[in-house]
Image (cartoon, rainbow, N blue to C red):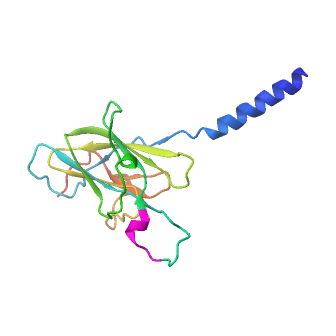
Amino acid sequence: MKTIFLATVGIAAAMLAGCATPSTIIRQPVGPDPFVATESGHNGKLQIFAAWTEQNPGALPKIVVYPNYARSTFMLCDADGKVLLDNAHSGPQSNPAPEVVVLAPGKYCLKTLRQGGKERWTEFPVVIEAGRVTEAYLNGGWVPPANTPFTMLVYSPGGFPVGWRANIPRRG
């Protein structure tokens, strides 16, 4: 009887552990494009190119219209973990333009919900510099300039580039 109880507890623990899907943390921070000159101003900008998910996948006719799509979920947090922007709670997002956030210079954290459900998050640091724009490509659609060294980019767990590495000396 004791053996059956221990086996049942062991199986239940293994099943519960399988439900926990921790965040994937990318350590290399995303920063501004090193080829773009600095503009005047005390603040910087973060431009977020979110992925799009279809809202009514079985609907006919099969026409791509943005009101049928929604931005994938992402959150922007400050260095202390306080949520500054949570697009899941900001209402319908049918505008295809990237989200632009004006921020004070510093380090922030961008968390994005990966495709495939099951609350699998990817998080990575972003660096904001005064007068510069940091671009984060969460949609897998960014193609860096030809011959860009691998070491100048930050990559997602899926293998696509999400932006420029921070702290690269400006080249433009």
Q: Position of residue 143 (x, y in %)?
A: 36, 65
What quarter of the picture does the C terminus occupy? bottom left
What quarter of the picture does the N terminus occupy? top right
The vertical placement of 114 against 124, above or below, is below
Decide which of 161, 150 is in the foreground and name it: 161
The residue at 33%/30% (across/down) is 80
Q: Position of residue 16 (x, y in %)?
A: 67, 35
Q: Quadrant of residue 82?
A: top left
Residue 140 visible in image: no
The vertical placement of 50 against 123, above or below, is below
Residue 35 visible in image: yes
Write the start and end of the magenta stretch as one range: 63-69
Q: Is 146 part of what is drawn in magenta?
A: no
Q: Is 66 part of what is drawn in magenta?
A: yes
The vertical placement of 155 against 5, above or below, is below
Q: Is residue 43 left or right of residue 14?
A: left
Q: Position of residue 144 (x, y in %)?
A: 34, 63
Q: Is residue 101 left or right of residue 43?
A: right
Q: Is residue 6 left or right of residue 89?
A: right
The residue at 56%/70% (across/down) is 58
Q: Position of residue 116 (x, y in %)?
A: 55, 55
